[in-house]
Image (tube, grey):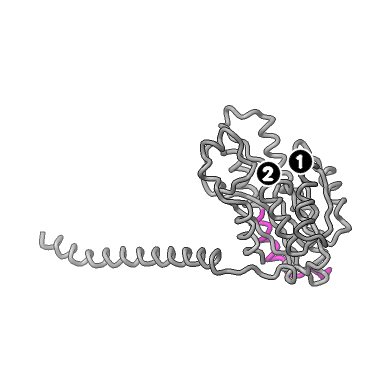
Amino acid sequence: MGALDNLADLLGPIVTYTIVFIGTIKLLGWIYYTSSFIKKFAFTWPLDIMERYSGKDTWCVITGASDGIGAETARKFAGLGFNCCLISRTTDKLKSVEAEIKKINPKVKTKLITANFFGKNSIEFYKDLVSQVKDLDISLVYINAGIMPSGHQINMPVEVMQHLLDVNVYHYTMLHKLFLPMLLERTKQGKRSWLCGTASVTWLGYARPFVHYTATKGYDGYLSTAVNYELKRMGKRADGADPNLIDLHCSTPMGVGTNLVKPPIKERVWIYFTHRPSSYVDALHKDMG
């Protein structure tokens, strides 16, 4: 017993100090990330994005611009002086948003494009869409359109799953692919651009009953992160294009009340979706650059 007692006397302080050390590191990490979060959202002011992105007389392009986050983003950018190209499947709603932003800033120009991403998973469809804005000086692109069906794998109709992939995955992928060369071309003049897509905080974990939506948003988040990683390591190209002048972001809204969430799920989890789109867009603005 004497030998065991001696061993316990020897190891006891070591174990204790090790636990204290690990706990301290964890605590410091928590303090750092918490303070960074508070600083970002409470004590950070947005950059002058008109100056950063050489935005005078330039355009922002927003998909899903007729409702929720997309419409609120259009109002924000119009208020800052950017011309707005609004893309959505509902012409009447687009005209309504256009009227609102004209009241906010009568000087901005607008362009409306009616496009339904359901079933439109052909390259030609997306090339035609982008061709309609190819002559605009585009400084900001927000790939925001999405749908959020609910249901379990065994019950969800295959047609709904197809629509989900069309809008949340194919639309997201193709517009990143087609807009990036246009924004790179702009960097040859030393001008910055902003390319952002909308994912969701749900992709960080399992979210019943939105497993399919969560999976698509996981793809979106990964794609944006990976493409940004590639861009930042390319360096300036021989043709003068500079990928480092493209700010590529992926926004991850949480609990924003929009028309994505439909009854009866909306009634069950209404308390979760309480954040206004305007509050989220204010935070997105702070994050730009």
The span shown in magenta is 224-240
Give the image location of residue 47, x and y in percent.
Answer: 66, 70
The residue to which callout 1 is attached is 117
**Residue at image x 79%, y 51%?**
99
Give the image location of residue 203, x and y in percent.
Answer: 57, 47
Q: Dot 1: few (<14), some (14–19), or many (≥20) neighbours within 10 Å?
A: many
Furthest toward the front, the residue is: 103
**Residue at image x 74%, y 71%?**
51
Furthest toward the right, the residue is: 135
Where is 165 relative to 105, above or below? above
Quarter of the picture holding the N terminus: bottom left
Q: CA distance from mark 2 to mark 1?
A: 9 Å
Q: Amino acid at mark 1?
A: Phe
Where is 238 relative to 151, above or below? below
Closer to the chain start, of discs 2 and 1, is 1
Q: Nearer the viewer, residue 64 or 247?
A: 64
Give the image location of residue 277, x and y in percent.
Answer: 63, 52
**Residue at image x 71%, y 42%?**
167
For residue 200: magenta?
Answer: no
Q: Which mark is residue 38?
A: none
How many numbered discs? 2
Left or right? Give the position of 33 relative to 143.
Answer: left
Give the image location of residue 226, x and y in percent.
Answer: 65, 56
**Residue at image x 50%, y 65%?**
38
Quarter of the picture holding the C terminus: bottom right
The residue to which callout 2 is attached is 146
Local SS, label 2: loop
Q: Nearer the viewer, residue 35 or 219?
A: 35
Q: Amino acid at mark 2?
A: Gly
Quadrant position of residue 22: bottom left
Where is 42 relative to 217, above or below? below
